Image (cartoon, helix red, strand yellow):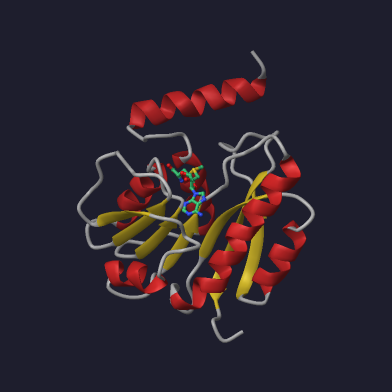
Amino acid sequence: MGKQRQTQDHYFREAKRLGYVSRAAFKLLEIDEKQGILAKGSRVLDVGCAPGAWLQVAAERVGKKGRIVGIDLKRVGVSLPSNVQTVQGDVFETDVADLTGMAGGLFDVVISDAAPDTTGDPTGDHFRSIRLCDHILTILPALLLPGGPVVMKAFEGESYPDLLARMRTMFAKVKGVKPKASRSISREMFVVGLTFDPGA
Ligand SMILES: C[S@@+](CC[C@H](N)C(=O)[O-])C[C@H]1O[C@@H](n2cnc3c(N)ncnc32)[C@H](O)[C@@H]1O
């Protein structure tokens, strides 16, 4: 068995053992461990939240006093604590005020694992993924508190540097990270922006 396959099987088994609905949980756990994104009591928006592993991780990290709102095209079926609310919808069409209304104010943190369904056309998938990230950046001033962090999945490709450049105009620190739980052959990266400056 190849090393890549062994690693993925390991995360799959660990997700089962720990009760996470998918191994995506380990991507957020690793990013959070290294970047310190989620704090007790935080209000978190999770874009592209189904089937719900990131919601499970976020709920553990923010605790009972935190609040989590998730949005996805698909319905989230997994059972979650009462401080997690989800809406089924398209982030391109959702009224941002509805999301902040559910949380009772602007979010401390915005995370997005949202991705288009992959089509086998890596260039098209890349542009659709960047379009999602760009949209989140556009609506961010109405979502995220000044100083807050963002984490977004992005498929690498020709517009990836432009995405990082745009983020550098909005955040004090920007980096692209590749968690161990992310398949090394996939073009998936996670862009992290720290210390949001809405006036920039
Ligand atoms: C990789 S999955 C997310 C996995 C999730 N983070 C978890 O831990 O369970 C990507 C999700 O993005 C969602 N998505 C893609 N485009 C979207 C959009 N425009 N609005 C909302 N959700 C979207 C998909 O429906 C899909 O469920």
- Residue nearest the observer in this picture, 197 or 163: 163
Image x and y of residue 43, in percent: 34, 65
Query: On the picture, is 152 further left or further right than 68?
Result: right
Residue at the extreme front? 93
Query: On the picture, is 147 further left or further right than 185?
Result: left
Residue 44 placement: quadrant: bottom left
Residue at the extreme top? 1
- Residue nearest the observer in this picture, 14 or 115: 115
Question: How many numbered discs, if any?
Answer: 0
Residue at horizontal 52%, vertical 64%? 150
Image x and y of residue 138, in percent: 57, 72
Query: On the picture, is 20 further left or further right than 151?
Result: left
Residue 167 placement: quadrant: bottom right
Residue at the extreme bottom? 199
Residue at horizontal 50%, vertical 24%? 10
Image quadrant for the C terminus? bottom right
Image x and y of residue 174, in percent: 64, 65
- Residue nearest the observer in this picture, 116 or 31: 116
Image x and y of residue 60, in percent: 31, 49
Query: On the picture, is 106 further left or further right than 35?
Result: left
Image quadrant for the N terminus? top right
Q: Is residue 139 above or below residue 1?
A: below
